Image: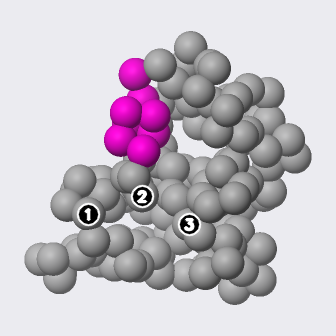
Amino acid sequence: MTMYYLLKTEPEVYSFEDLKRDRETTWDGVTNAQAVKNLREMHKGDKLVIYHTGEERRAVGAARVVSVDATDPKVPLVRIAAGKAISNPAALADIKQSALFSDSPLLRQGRLSVVPLTEPQYEALVSGEL
């Protein structure tokens, strides 16, 4: 069963454009226990939204999980591949106004860097129709 997640990144550190250039990367630097738990739950083929933090605060692109190596008990090595840029990126202000996200950890746990999404939340973000 496909799962959906939002991955937050600081665009000046590693942006969606960087991911597109690299095509694939290992998603690392996650230290929060809840975010690491969410990484551990990922499987090959899961769908992702890349979200820029900082000044942008918006969902900017899609990606997918290529592989998960969970041999490290502290943090799994999750490889992701770039998908398409979101044509109409959803700003945090728009996400906050959407009833779809009323109970989302994205809004309840604002500092969480790996956030589970529902399929409707994922579809709303990547379609650019939020």
Counting other residues with Cα less than 10 Å from the Cα at mark 2, is it few (<14), some (14-19), or many (20 or more)?
Answer: many
Q: Residues within 10 Å of mark 3 (few under 14, many from 20)?
A: many
Q: Mark 3 = which residue? A: 9
Q: Which mark is residue 86?
A: none
Tag 1 near tag 2, CB within 8 Å = yes
**Chain part drawn in magenta:** 103-110
**What x and y, as percent, mark residue 53?**
60, 59
Judge by depth and name the residue closer to the eye, 25 or 89: 89
Task: Locate residue 56, reporting x and y percent.
Answer: 72, 56
Q: Are marks 2 and 3 in contact (CB under 8 Å)?
A: no
Write down the quadrant of residue 74 in the picture: bottom left
Q: Quadrant of residue 44?
A: bottom left
Real-space Cα separation, disc 1 to disc 2, in angstroms: 8 Å
Q: Is residue 64 visible?
A: no
Query: Residue at the location (79% across, 27% down)?
Result: 129
From this viewpoint, is residue 85 visible? yes
- Return the residue at label 2: 113
Q: Residue at x 47, y 48 (%)?
A: 5
Q: CA distance from mark 2 to mark 3?
A: 8 Å
Amino acid identity at mark 2? Ser
Q: Closest to the observer: 121 or 23?
A: 121
Image coordinates of residue 128 in percent, x first then y, are 80, 36
